[in-house]
Image (cartoon, grey):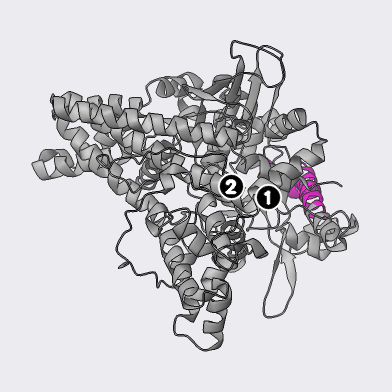
Amino acid sequence: MRIPEHIIEQIRRETDIIEVIGDVVPLRQRGRNYLGLCPFHNEKTPSFNVLPDKGIFKCFGCGKGGDAIHFIREHQKLSYIEAVRVLAERLGIALPDADSEQSRGEANRYEAAYNALKLAATFFAKNLYAEIGTEALEYVTRRGFSEQTLQTFMLGYAPESFTATMQELQHLGFSEEAMLDAGLLGKKEETGRVYDRFRGRLMFPIVNPTGRVIGFGGRRMRDDEEGKASAKYLNSPQSLVYNKSEVLYGIFQAKDALRRLEYGILVEGYADLLSVHQAGFHNVVASSGTALTKEQLKLLSRFCKRLKIVYDADAAGIRAALRGLDLAVEEGFDVEIVRLPEGDDPDSIIQRDGAESFQMRLDHALSLVDFKGEIYREQGLLTSPEGKAEAVHSLMETIAKVPDRIKRDFMIQSVSMRFGLRVEDLYAELTQHLRKQQLRVMDMRPRAKQDQSERNRKSGEASQGALHLVSKQSPESPIPSATTDTDNPTDAPPFLADEAHRARGVEYDISPEELLSEELFPEEAEILRIALNNKGAMGFMKHRLGLTDEFFLTGLAQRLFMAIDDAATVQPNETPLETMLQGIAAGAEDERNFEVIGLAVRKETPSENWRTYNVSLEEDSVRILRDSTHRLQMRRLDVELSTLHDTLRAAQTQGEIDREFAALRQIQIADTEKRRILALMNTA
């Protein structure tokens, strides 16, 4: 069976290699990377390295290395297709069925779209050197772009015609549907007439990391007829193979340099990128056609974790740089900002002052603190106590997003020196922002808008991908500890025996829009789907495992748990899902909530073993529950430790000995509990 390349790329992008390898090899963190004993040869000293930023592993003992797919192949002795299938199942990604005509047709649609885009790029490139492309060729020559640059980035020209591109591809055997899938055609709703989307434009092919054309950007060469000016730049629409929020222009040409130099240069426009690349800076990418997104940064993080942002010097460029700065910091990048003179952009700097001047500006890029400090000064915020307070609050909000605690310490020292503030006051401010941030994450609302089917899939399929850690415990709250009997698979892990149940005063009645804008953690979805679809499951979880709504981390999971519990109480001899559906049929006023709950949690075939509370659970359900509860508690402990370390640092700075010792004790307890849970997970 041939798996479409776009699906393999999605699997690579969404797979957390630490989770995949961590299921097999005990790993310990060392800086950004992880170290363990190689599973492919006998060794006593760890030489097996996992690099999550790049999504690869490498053993310096036996030499084996590669991505998550290669690891699964080597470790489980599988074929490439079988290894891809294993990872797809972890992520809840459906693979095409080799025996399904529909699946083969879907795969063929993708291939047809890719091939149409490839040949369209060839057609456009040929036109650039033909008579119809004279104006476009003169333009790029006037801009100083060399022949080598034009070839490297495959620049071309789309004829000033409503049908030229369509006729060329039809002549090569492509259907109208394939060209629509590729985003090459537009279609008028009133008449159904199709036409070339790109007309009279200089064309910039957009290429994915594997080198396939997935879309285009087109620059207008002249105004439309009758003096009407169309958009200066026109990008491909969202299509079968192109999602503008997940791709960076120039990533294919830059990926080798990004890995080698270990940092990237981020610019805004196509021309900026061409000029910077041509000047010798091959580690440059552009966020053309869209504001910088989290998905684009995740893509970039596969190749490097340092970033220099070089946006235009106008107000819009500064706003974009500030937004990109916060997003990049949150994704774990070391970020610097290159400020340009007012009215300049990277292209104009290189054209006027040359590559050496641009390199000098890169070398003197501003840190997060210095860049924001300059912006606040220019905005006049530093001339009054109120303005300074606003500036510091904003800075600390950004610093709170930095995942590395040591980096945060250095940044706080920098803010202290720049603004003449006491370090202990800044740590107190940081702690407030960290707690607010945790509360926001617990009420998760994804930034990237996804289509309805994608949201349903993700909420319905338990993913093993990387997720942010959240916790509802405060730094002062104790961490439960107890003994466990691992021989009894139906016993709850000891940390689930917390009998302190919260008052049931939380409302779970929320709108479909609110539910669909939140995301469950995979572990929460696993637990809830069992509770929803099985008789007696809720009672078992509550009375045997000690689960309450308080155990869950997201607000959505807590509300769903209580809703399912209420349904189980009303009709104990039915599954909660059946009870909810009966309520819908009877016209219950909270019908909308039940409908969304049915979509939000993955459905499972009921097990007869759930019929009473006193029987053993079937093995798969036990494994899922134990694994999910363990992983959920590990998330809680990770954030608990992060907050405790910040509390410890603040106590040390302020000389509060009692508070320092209390934090150290809690850190020790949390570390012990984490090791114990990890041992349970490794022996499960």
Locate residue 429, reporting x and y percent. Answer: 20, 39
Classify residue 440 as left or right of residue 544: left
Q: Main secondary structure of the magenta part?
A: helix
Q: Amino acid at mark 2?
A: Glu
Question: Which numbered circle lies on residue 246?
Answer: 2
Q: Amino acid at mark 1?
A: Gly
Query: Mark 2 and 1 residues: CB-CB less than 8 Å, in contact?
Result: no
**Is residue 199 inside the magenta stretch?**
no
Say which residue label 1 marks.
215
Locate residue 407, reporting x and y percent. Answer: 35, 26
Q: Is residue 560 above or below residue 392?
A: below
Residue 495 vs residue 439, the one in the foreground? 495
The secondary structure type at the circle numbered 1 is strand
Question: Which numbered circle lies on residue 345?
Answer: none
Q: Is residue 427 above or below residue 499?
A: above
Locate residue 643, reporting x and y percent. Answer: 31, 36
- Magenta part of the protein: which range? 111-137
Q: Quadrant of residue 415?
A: top left
User: What separation in Å lies between label 2 and label 1 (alpha carbons)?
Assistant: 12 Å
Residue 397 vs residue 664, the one in the foreground? 664
Q: Is residue 306 visible?
A: yes
